[in-house]
Amino acid sequence: MQGTHLLLEEPIRMISVLEPSKTSFFPAMTKIVGTLGPKSRSVEVIEGCLKAGLSVARFDFSWGSDEYHQETLENLKKAVKNTKKLCAVMLDTLGPELQVFNKNGTPIELEANAVVTLTPDSSREASSELLPINYAGLAQVVKQGDTIFVGQYLFTGSETTSVWLEVAEVKGQDVVCLVKNAATLAGSLFTMHASQVRIDLPTLSDSDKHVISTWGVKNNIDFISLSYTRHAEDVRQTRAYLSKLGDLNQTQIFAKIETIEGLKHFDEILQEADGIILSRGNLGIDLPPEKVFLFQKAAVYKCNMAGKPSIITRVVDSMTDNLRPTRAEATDVANAVLDGTDGILLGAETLRGLYPVETISIVGKICAEAEKVHNQAAYFKKTVKYVGEPMTHLESIASSAVRAAIKVKASVIVVFTSSGRAARLIAKYRPTMPVLAVVIPRLTTNWLKWSFTGAFQERKYILLPAASFKS
Protein backbone atom coordinates (compact mmCIF):
# COMPACT_ATOMS: atom_id res chain seq x y z
CA MET A 1 0.00 0.00 0.00
CA GLN A 2 1.60 3.22 -1.13
CA GLY A 3 -0.08 6.58 -0.64
CA THR A 4 1.08 10.12 -1.00
CA HIS A 5 2.28 10.24 2.60
CA LEU A 6 3.17 6.71 3.76
CA LEU A 7 5.65 4.24 2.34
CA LEU A 8 4.77 0.82 3.75
CA GLU A 9 5.09 -2.69 2.35
CA GLU A 10 1.91 -4.66 1.61
CA PRO A 11 0.98 -6.80 3.38
CA ILE A 12 2.06 -4.80 6.42
CA ARG A 13 4.06 -6.90 8.83
CA MET A 14 1.98 -6.25 11.94
CA ILE A 15 4.47 -8.19 14.02
CA SER A 16 6.96 -5.37 13.37
CA VAL A 17 4.78 -3.11 15.49
CA LEU A 18 5.59 -5.31 18.48
CA GLU A 19 9.33 -5.20 17.89
CA PRO A 20 11.19 -2.74 20.14
CA SER A 21 12.30 0.46 18.45
CA LYS A 22 15.94 0.50 17.46
CA THR A 23 18.05 3.21 19.04
CA SER A 24 19.86 5.55 16.68
CA PHE A 25 23.04 7.57 17.09
CA PHE A 26 21.10 10.57 15.79
CA PRO A 27 17.88 11.75 17.49
CA ALA A 28 14.62 12.32 15.64
CA MET A 29 15.04 14.73 12.74
CA THR A 30 11.88 16.55 13.80
CA LYS A 31 12.96 19.22 16.25
CA ILE A 32 11.37 19.77 19.66
CA VAL A 33 10.84 23.25 21.10
CA GLY A 34 10.18 23.23 24.84
CA THR A 35 8.88 26.09 26.98
CA LEU A 36 10.94 26.50 30.14
CA GLY A 37 9.19 27.50 33.36
CA PRO A 38 8.42 26.52 36.96
CA LYS A 39 8.63 22.76 36.37
CA SER A 40 11.54 22.82 33.94
CA ARG A 41 14.00 25.54 34.96
CA SER A 42 16.43 23.74 37.23
CA VAL A 43 19.79 22.67 35.82
CA GLU A 44 19.02 19.00 36.51
CA VAL A 45 15.66 19.02 34.71
CA ILE A 46 17.01 20.99 31.76
CA GLU A 47 19.86 18.50 31.42
CA GLY A 48 17.25 15.74 31.27
CA CYS A 49 15.31 17.67 28.63
CA LEU A 50 18.42 18.15 26.48
CA LYS A 51 19.32 14.46 26.69
CA ALA A 52 15.72 13.58 25.80
CA GLY A 53 15.85 15.64 22.60
CA LEU A 54 15.19 19.32 23.35
CA SER A 55 16.55 21.47 20.49
CA VAL A 56 15.18 24.93 21.28
CA ALA A 57 14.34 26.49 24.65
CA ARG A 58 11.36 28.85 24.47
CA PHE A 59 11.02 31.79 26.86
CA ASP A 60 7.48 33.14 26.97
CA PHE A 61 7.38 36.79 28.03
CA SER A 62 3.61 36.93 28.39
CA TRP A 63 4.35 36.15 32.03
CA GLY A 64 7.32 36.31 34.41
CA SER A 65 9.94 39.01 34.96
CA ASP A 66 13.14 39.53 32.99
CA GLU A 67 15.09 38.45 36.08
CA TYR A 68 13.12 35.21 36.34
CA HIS A 69 13.78 34.31 32.71
CA GLN A 70 17.45 35.28 33.04
CA GLU A 71 17.89 32.86 35.93
CA THR A 72 16.32 30.13 33.81
CA LEU A 73 18.61 30.97 30.89
CA GLU A 74 21.70 30.83 33.09
CA ASN A 75 20.61 27.36 34.19
CA LEU A 76 20.17 26.42 30.52
CA LYS A 77 23.73 27.54 29.77
CA LYS A 78 25.04 25.35 32.61
CA ALA A 79 23.00 22.38 31.36
CA VAL A 80 24.29 22.87 27.79
CA LYS A 81 27.86 22.95 29.08
CA ASN A 82 27.35 19.85 31.23
CA THR A 83 25.63 17.78 28.53
CA LYS A 84 27.50 19.21 25.52
CA LYS A 85 24.14 19.41 23.73
CA LEU A 86 23.45 22.35 21.43
CA CYS A 87 20.29 24.32 22.24
CA ALA A 88 18.96 27.51 20.68
CA VAL A 89 16.95 30.23 22.46
CA MET A 90 13.54 31.45 21.31
CA LEU A 91 11.91 34.59 22.72
CA ASP A 92 8.12 34.47 22.50
CA THR A 93 6.53 37.92 22.43
CA LEU A 94 3.35 38.96 24.22
CA GLY A 95 1.84 40.77 21.23
CA PRO A 96 -1.82 41.86 21.32
CA GLU A 97 -2.74 39.11 23.79
CA LEU A 98 -5.85 39.71 25.88
CA GLN A 99 -5.61 38.80 29.54
CA VAL A 100 -7.86 38.54 32.58
CA PHE A 101 -6.44 39.56 35.96
CA ASN A 102 -7.18 37.92 39.29
CA LYS A 103 -5.00 39.91 41.71
CA ASN A 104 -5.80 37.97 44.88
CA GLY A 105 -5.45 34.58 43.18
CA THR A 106 -8.63 33.18 44.75
CA PRO A 107 -10.22 30.52 42.48
CA ILE A 108 -13.19 31.90 40.56
CA GLU A 109 -16.21 29.60 40.29
CA LEU A 110 -18.33 30.17 37.19
CA GLU A 111 -21.67 28.43 36.77
CA ALA A 112 -23.32 27.58 33.45
CA ASN A 113 -25.99 30.09 32.31
CA ALA A 114 -24.77 32.68 34.84
CA VAL A 115 -23.84 36.23 33.80
CA VAL A 116 -20.33 37.67 34.10
CA THR A 117 -19.07 41.11 33.10
CA LEU A 118 -15.71 41.83 31.46
CA THR A 119 -14.39 45.26 32.47
CA PRO A 120 -11.23 47.21 31.60
CA ASP A 121 -11.22 48.65 35.14
CA SER A 122 -8.19 46.78 36.49
CA SER A 123 -8.62 48.30 39.96
CA ARG A 124 -11.63 46.06 40.64
CA GLU A 125 -11.39 42.60 42.19
CA ALA A 126 -12.12 39.55 40.07
CA SER A 127 -15.14 37.49 41.05
CA SER A 128 -17.74 35.14 39.58
CA GLU A 129 -19.68 38.24 38.46
CA LEU A 130 -16.77 40.44 37.27
CA LEU A 131 -13.53 39.79 35.37
CA PRO A 132 -11.00 42.68 34.91
CA ILE A 133 -9.24 42.63 31.51
CA ASN A 134 -6.26 44.43 29.96
CA TYR A 135 -8.01 45.85 26.88
CA ALA A 136 -10.23 48.93 27.03
CA GLY A 137 -11.40 48.58 23.44
CA LEU A 138 -13.15 45.22 23.72
CA ALA A 139 -16.62 46.80 23.93
CA GLN A 140 -16.00 48.55 20.59
CA VAL A 141 -15.09 45.43 18.64
CA VAL A 142 -17.49 42.72 19.89
CA LYS A 143 -21.21 42.36 19.31
CA GLN A 144 -24.04 40.27 20.67
CA GLY A 145 -23.54 36.59 19.96
CA ASP A 146 -19.73 36.72 19.68
CA THR A 147 -17.75 34.00 21.45
CA ILE A 148 -15.02 34.72 24.01
CA PHE A 149 -12.76 32.08 25.52
CA VAL A 150 -11.05 32.49 28.90
CA GLY A 151 -8.62 29.95 30.33
CA GLN A 152 -5.54 29.41 32.44
CA TYR A 153 -2.25 30.50 30.89
CA LEU A 154 -1.33 27.88 28.26
CA PHE A 155 -4.79 26.47 28.81
CA THR A 156 -5.54 22.90 27.86
CA GLY A 157 -9.11 23.46 26.75
CA SER A 158 -10.44 21.31 29.56
CA GLU A 159 -14.00 22.30 30.41
CA THR A 160 -13.19 22.42 34.12
CA THR A 161 -10.35 24.95 33.80
CA SER A 162 -11.54 27.16 30.93
CA VAL A 163 -14.79 28.82 30.05
CA TRP A 164 -16.72 29.77 26.92
CA LEU A 165 -18.60 33.06 27.07
CA GLU A 166 -21.24 34.44 24.72
CA VAL A 167 -21.58 38.22 24.45
CA ALA A 168 -25.06 39.24 25.67
CA GLU A 169 -24.75 43.02 25.56
CA VAL A 170 -22.33 45.94 25.70
CA LYS A 171 -22.63 48.55 28.47
CA GLY A 172 -20.22 51.43 27.96
CA GLN A 173 -16.73 49.91 28.21
CA ASP A 174 -18.06 46.75 29.86
CA VAL A 175 -19.06 43.56 28.03
CA VAL A 176 -21.78 41.44 29.64
CA CYS A 177 -21.51 37.74 28.83
CA LEU A 178 -23.45 34.54 29.35
CA VAL A 179 -21.40 31.65 30.79
CA LYS A 180 -21.77 28.60 28.54
CA ASN A 181 -20.09 26.00 30.75
CA ALA A 182 -19.26 25.60 34.44
CA ALA A 183 -15.56 26.13 35.19
CA THR A 184 -13.09 27.04 37.90
CA LEU A 185 -10.51 29.67 36.97
CA ALA A 186 -7.57 29.09 39.31
CA GLY A 187 -4.56 31.41 39.29
CA SER A 188 -3.76 35.08 38.93
CA LEU A 189 -3.60 35.42 35.14
CA PHE A 190 -5.79 34.01 32.38
CA THR A 191 -5.62 34.23 28.60
CA MET A 192 -8.67 35.60 26.78
CA HIS A 193 -9.44 35.12 23.11
CA ALA A 194 -12.32 36.72 21.22
CA SER A 195 -13.17 34.43 18.31
CA GLN A 196 -12.83 36.06 14.85
CA VAL A 197 -12.58 39.55 16.35
CA ARG A 198 -9.79 41.91 15.28
CA ILE A 199 -7.99 43.44 18.24
CA ASP A 200 -6.65 46.91 17.43
CA LEU A 201 -3.31 46.56 19.20
CA PRO A 202 0.21 46.49 17.67
CA THR A 203 1.70 43.06 16.97
CA LEU A 204 5.04 44.15 18.44
CA SER A 205 4.09 46.03 21.60
CA ASP A 206 6.20 48.52 23.52
CA SER A 207 6.78 45.92 26.22
CA ASP A 208 7.96 43.47 23.55
CA LYS A 209 10.41 46.04 22.18
CA HIS A 210 11.74 46.65 25.68
CA VAL A 211 12.31 42.95 26.32
CA ILE A 212 13.98 42.42 22.93
CA SER A 213 16.26 45.47 23.26
CA THR A 214 17.36 44.52 26.78
CA TRP A 215 17.03 40.80 27.53
CA GLY A 216 17.19 39.79 23.87
CA VAL A 217 20.28 41.82 23.03
CA LYS A 218 22.04 40.80 26.22
CA ASN A 219 21.57 37.12 25.43
CA ASN A 220 21.95 37.29 21.64
CA ILE A 221 18.73 35.33 21.07
CA ASP A 222 18.45 33.03 18.06
CA PHE A 223 14.72 33.15 17.29
CA ILE A 224 11.76 35.42 17.91
CA SER A 225 8.30 33.89 17.98
CA LEU A 226 6.16 36.80 16.79
CA SER A 227 2.81 36.21 18.50
CA TYR A 228 -0.42 37.03 16.70
CA THR A 229 1.20 37.78 13.35
CA ARG A 230 -1.62 39.09 11.15
CA HIS A 231 0.12 40.69 8.16
CA ALA A 232 3.44 40.49 6.33
CA GLU A 233 4.03 44.06 7.47
CA ASP A 234 4.20 42.78 11.07
CA VAL A 235 7.25 40.72 10.13
CA ARG A 236 8.83 43.55 8.14
CA GLN A 237 8.44 45.99 11.02
CA THR A 238 9.92 43.51 13.47
CA ARG A 239 12.87 42.84 11.18
CA ALA A 240 13.45 46.56 10.77
CA TYR A 241 13.45 46.92 14.55
CA LEU A 242 15.94 44.07 14.95
CA SER A 243 18.23 45.60 12.34
CA LYS A 244 18.67 48.62 14.63
CA LEU A 245 19.88 46.43 17.47
CA GLY A 246 23.18 45.37 15.92
CA ASP A 247 23.76 41.86 17.23
CA LEU A 248 20.16 40.81 16.55
CA ASN A 249 20.12 41.69 12.85
CA GLN A 250 20.50 37.97 12.05
CA THR A 251 17.93 36.73 14.57
CA GLN A 252 15.29 34.70 12.76
CA ILE A 253 11.61 35.59 12.97
CA PHE A 254 9.02 32.83 13.24
CA ALA A 255 5.55 34.18 12.53
CA LYS A 256 2.96 32.73 14.88
CA ILE A 257 -0.35 32.25 13.09
CA GLU A 258 -3.12 32.40 15.71
CA THR A 259 -6.10 34.12 14.11
CA ILE A 260 -8.31 34.14 11.04
CA GLU A 261 -6.62 37.38 10.00
CA GLY A 262 -3.21 35.71 9.95
CA LEU A 263 -4.66 32.77 8.04
CA LYS A 264 -6.05 35.06 5.34
CA HIS A 265 -2.63 36.65 4.81
CA PHE A 266 -0.64 33.44 5.20
CA ASP A 267 1.08 33.47 1.80
CA GLU A 268 2.43 37.00 2.24
CA ILE A 269 3.52 36.27 5.80
CA LEU A 270 5.36 33.13 4.67
CA GLN A 271 7.34 35.14 2.13
CA GLU A 272 8.62 37.52 4.80
CA ALA A 273 9.11 35.19 7.79
CA ASP A 274 11.98 32.76 8.38
CA GLY A 275 9.56 30.13 9.64
CA ILE A 276 5.97 29.57 10.74
CA ILE A 277 4.44 28.46 14.04
CA LEU A 278 0.89 27.14 13.73
CA SER A 279 -0.71 28.04 17.05
CA ARG A 280 -3.48 25.46 17.05
CA GLY A 281 -4.80 26.55 20.44
CA ASN A 282 -6.12 29.94 19.35
CA LEU A 283 -6.74 28.80 15.76
CA GLY A 284 -8.88 26.03 17.16
CA ILE A 285 -11.10 28.72 18.67
CA ASP A 286 -11.26 30.91 15.57
CA LEU A 287 -11.83 27.98 13.20
CA PRO A 288 -14.53 25.31 13.33
CA PRO A 289 -12.94 22.10 14.69
CA GLU A 290 -13.47 20.28 11.40
CA LYS A 291 -11.40 22.91 9.55
CA VAL A 292 -8.28 22.94 11.74
CA PHE A 293 -6.65 19.92 10.08
CA LEU A 294 -7.22 21.42 6.61
CA PHE A 295 -5.36 24.58 7.53
CA GLN A 296 -2.56 22.59 9.15
CA LYS A 297 -2.00 20.41 6.07
CA ALA A 298 -2.18 23.34 3.65
CA ALA A 299 0.14 25.53 5.74
CA VAL A 300 2.72 22.78 6.28
CA TYR A 301 2.75 22.00 2.54
CA LYS A 302 3.34 25.66 1.68
CA CYS A 303 6.19 25.85 4.21
CA ASN A 304 7.77 22.68 2.80
CA MET A 305 7.72 24.00 -0.76
CA ALA A 306 9.14 27.34 0.38
CA GLY A 307 11.92 25.55 2.27
CA LYS A 308 10.96 27.22 5.54
CA PRO A 309 10.46 25.38 8.85
CA SER A 310 6.95 24.83 10.17
CA ILE A 311 6.20 24.14 13.83
CA ILE A 312 2.90 23.03 15.34
CA THR A 313 1.65 23.49 18.90
CA ARG A 314 -0.81 21.79 21.27
CA VAL A 315 -0.01 18.16 20.58
CA VAL A 316 0.11 16.33 23.92
CA ASP A 317 -1.92 18.52 26.29
CA SER A 318 -2.86 15.56 28.49
CA MET A 319 0.80 15.04 29.43
CA THR A 320 0.62 18.22 31.50
CA ASP A 321 -0.77 15.96 34.22
CA ASN A 322 -0.24 12.43 32.87
CA LEU A 323 2.78 10.28 32.13
CA ARG A 324 1.44 9.04 28.79
CA PRO A 325 -0.30 10.81 25.91
CA THR A 326 -3.70 9.72 24.69
CA ARG A 327 -3.87 7.51 21.61
CA ALA A 328 -5.33 10.40 19.65
CA GLU A 329 -2.45 12.69 20.68
CA ALA A 330 0.20 10.12 19.74
CA THR A 331 -1.45 9.68 16.34
CA ASP A 332 -1.70 13.45 15.93
CA VAL A 333 2.06 13.86 16.43
CA ALA A 334 2.85 11.10 13.93
CA ASN A 335 0.47 12.48 11.31
CA ALA A 336 1.98 15.95 11.69
CA VAL A 337 5.42 14.48 10.93
CA LEU A 338 4.06 12.60 7.93
CA ASP A 339 2.50 15.84 6.69
CA GLY A 340 5.98 17.42 6.72
CA THR A 341 6.06 19.33 10.00
CA ASP A 342 9.61 20.28 11.00
CA GLY A 343 9.12 20.91 14.70
CA ILE A 344 6.84 20.29 17.68
CA LEU A 345 6.35 23.07 20.22
CA LEU A 346 5.55 22.02 23.78
CA GLY A 347 3.93 24.66 25.98
CA ALA A 348 2.14 23.75 29.18
CA GLU A 349 3.49 20.21 28.90
CA THR A 350 7.02 21.37 29.81
CA LEU A 351 6.36 24.75 31.45
CA ARG A 352 4.11 23.58 34.27
CA GLY A 353 3.64 19.93 33.39
CA LEU A 354 4.57 17.22 35.86
CA TYR A 355 6.65 15.23 33.36
CA PRO A 356 8.70 17.59 31.12
CA VAL A 357 11.55 15.15 30.43
CA GLU A 358 9.24 12.21 29.75
CA THR A 359 7.07 14.35 27.46
CA ILE A 360 10.02 15.36 25.30
CA SER A 361 11.26 11.77 25.19
CA ILE A 362 7.90 10.31 24.15
CA VAL A 363 7.24 12.98 21.52
CA GLY A 364 10.74 12.39 20.11
CA LYS A 365 10.14 8.63 19.90
CA ILE A 366 6.84 9.13 18.08
CA CYS A 367 8.50 11.51 15.62
CA ALA A 368 11.34 9.03 14.99
CA GLU A 369 8.90 6.20 14.26
CA ALA A 370 6.89 8.37 11.86
CA GLU A 371 10.04 9.45 10.03
CA LYS A 372 10.85 5.80 9.27
CA VAL A 373 7.74 5.45 7.09
CA HIS A 374 7.73 8.89 5.51
CA ASN A 375 7.50 8.59 1.73
CA GLN A 376 10.66 10.49 0.90
CA ALA A 377 10.65 9.48 -2.78
CA ALA A 378 7.20 10.98 -3.36
CA TYR A 379 8.13 14.08 -1.38
CA PHE A 380 11.35 14.55 -3.37
CA LYS A 381 9.55 14.34 -6.71
CA LYS A 382 6.87 16.74 -5.53
CA THR A 383 9.44 19.28 -4.34
CA VAL A 384 11.51 19.11 -7.54
CA LYS A 385 8.35 19.55 -9.62
CA TYR A 386 7.29 22.53 -7.52
CA VAL A 387 10.68 24.23 -7.86
CA GLY A 388 10.58 23.77 -11.63
CA GLU A 389 13.27 24.56 -14.18
CA PRO A 390 15.66 26.15 -14.59
CA MET A 391 16.87 25.68 -11.01
CA THR A 392 19.43 27.97 -9.44
CA HIS A 393 22.92 26.48 -9.26
CA LEU A 394 22.75 26.04 -5.49
CA GLU A 395 19.29 24.47 -5.61
CA SER A 396 20.46 22.05 -8.29
CA ILE A 397 23.49 21.06 -6.22
CA ALA A 398 21.34 20.58 -3.10
CA SER A 399 18.72 18.39 -4.81
CA SER A 400 21.39 16.35 -6.60
CA ALA A 401 23.27 15.79 -3.32
CA VAL A 402 20.13 14.43 -1.68
CA ARG A 403 19.36 12.18 -4.66
CA ALA A 404 22.92 10.81 -4.69
CA ALA A 405 22.95 10.25 -0.92
CA ILE A 406 19.74 8.22 -1.10
CA LYS A 407 20.94 6.14 -4.06
CA VAL A 408 24.19 5.14 -2.34
CA LYS A 409 22.41 4.71 1.02
CA ALA A 410 24.70 7.22 2.72
CA SER A 411 24.60 7.39 6.51
CA VAL A 412 24.92 11.15 6.70
CA ILE A 413 25.25 14.24 4.46
CA VAL A 414 28.07 16.58 5.52
CA VAL A 415 27.75 20.23 4.50
CA PHE A 416 30.40 22.89 5.04
CA THR A 417 28.76 26.27 5.42
CA SER A 418 29.33 29.73 6.82
CA SER A 419 25.80 31.09 6.49
CA GLY A 420 23.68 27.92 6.59
CA ARG A 421 22.12 28.54 3.18
CA ALA A 422 23.40 25.31 1.62
CA ALA A 423 22.29 23.27 4.62
CA ARG A 424 18.87 24.90 4.48
CA LEU A 425 18.41 23.94 0.82
CA ILE A 426 19.51 20.35 1.37
CA ALA A 427 17.16 20.04 4.36
CA LYS A 428 14.36 21.35 2.14
CA TYR A 429 14.46 18.05 0.21
CA ARG A 430 14.14 16.10 3.49
CA PRO A 431 16.77 13.38 3.00
CA THR A 432 16.29 10.15 4.91
CA MET A 433 19.67 10.55 6.60
CA PRO A 434 20.79 13.34 8.94
CA VAL A 435 22.47 16.47 7.57
CA LEU A 436 25.63 17.35 9.48
CA ALA A 437 26.39 21.02 8.81
CA VAL A 438 29.92 22.02 9.72
CA VAL A 439 29.87 25.77 10.34
CA ILE A 440 33.04 27.53 9.19
CA PRO A 441 33.81 30.32 11.70
CA ARG A 442 34.17 33.81 10.29
CA LEU A 443 37.20 35.87 11.17
CA THR A 444 36.17 39.43 12.04
CA THR A 445 37.94 42.48 13.37
CA ASN A 446 37.08 45.91 14.75
CA TRP A 447 40.72 46.96 14.22
CA LEU A 448 41.39 46.49 17.92
CA LYS A 449 40.99 42.73 18.12
CA TRP A 450 40.34 39.73 15.93
CA SER A 451 37.63 37.20 16.73
CA PHE A 452 36.00 34.06 15.31
CA THR A 453 32.21 33.82 15.06
CA GLY A 454 30.12 30.80 14.21
CA ALA A 455 28.18 29.68 17.28
CA PHE A 456 25.24 31.91 16.38
CA GLN A 457 25.03 30.38 12.89
CA GLU A 458 25.04 26.93 14.50
CA ARG A 459 22.03 27.67 16.66
CA LYS A 460 20.21 29.72 14.03
CA TYR A 461 19.69 26.73 11.73
CA ILE A 462 18.98 24.15 14.40
CA LEU A 463 15.28 24.09 13.44
CA LEU A 464 16.01 22.78 9.94
CA PRO A 465 14.67 19.24 9.43
CA ALA A 466 17.38 16.57 9.72
CA ALA A 467 20.11 19.11 10.49
CA SER A 468 22.82 18.81 13.12
CA PHE A 469 25.48 21.48 13.48
CA LYS A 470 29.09 21.54 14.55
CA SER A 471 31.70 24.31 14.43
Image (spheres, grey):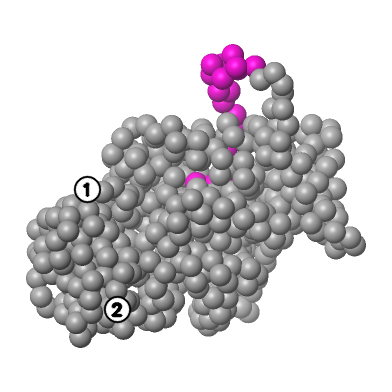
Q: Residue at x 57, y 26 (%)?
A: 23
Find residue 460 and report its image quarter: bottom right
Callout 1, which amino acid? Thr
Task: Specify whether 84 is left or right of 70.
Answer: right
Find residue 141 and report its image quarter: bottom left
Which residue, given by chain and number where applicable, does mark 1 sit on? 160
Classify mark 2: helix, strand or loop. Answer: helix
Magenta stretch contains residue 25:
yes
Circle 1 Cα neighbour tier, 10 Å, few/some/many (<14 / 14–19 / ≥20): some
Task: Specify whether 122 is left or right of 354.
Answer: left
Which segment is the magenta one? 13-32
Which residue, given by chain and number where applicable, does mark 2 sit on? 138
Q: Nearer the viewer, residue 116 or 51?
A: 116
Magenta stretch contains residue 82:
no
Callout 2, which amino acid? Leu
Residue 280 picture location, percent across and down? 45, 55
**Residue 69 seen anywhere in this rendered image of the structure:** yes
Q: Of the numbered discs in the image, which one, if any, rests on residue 383?
A: none
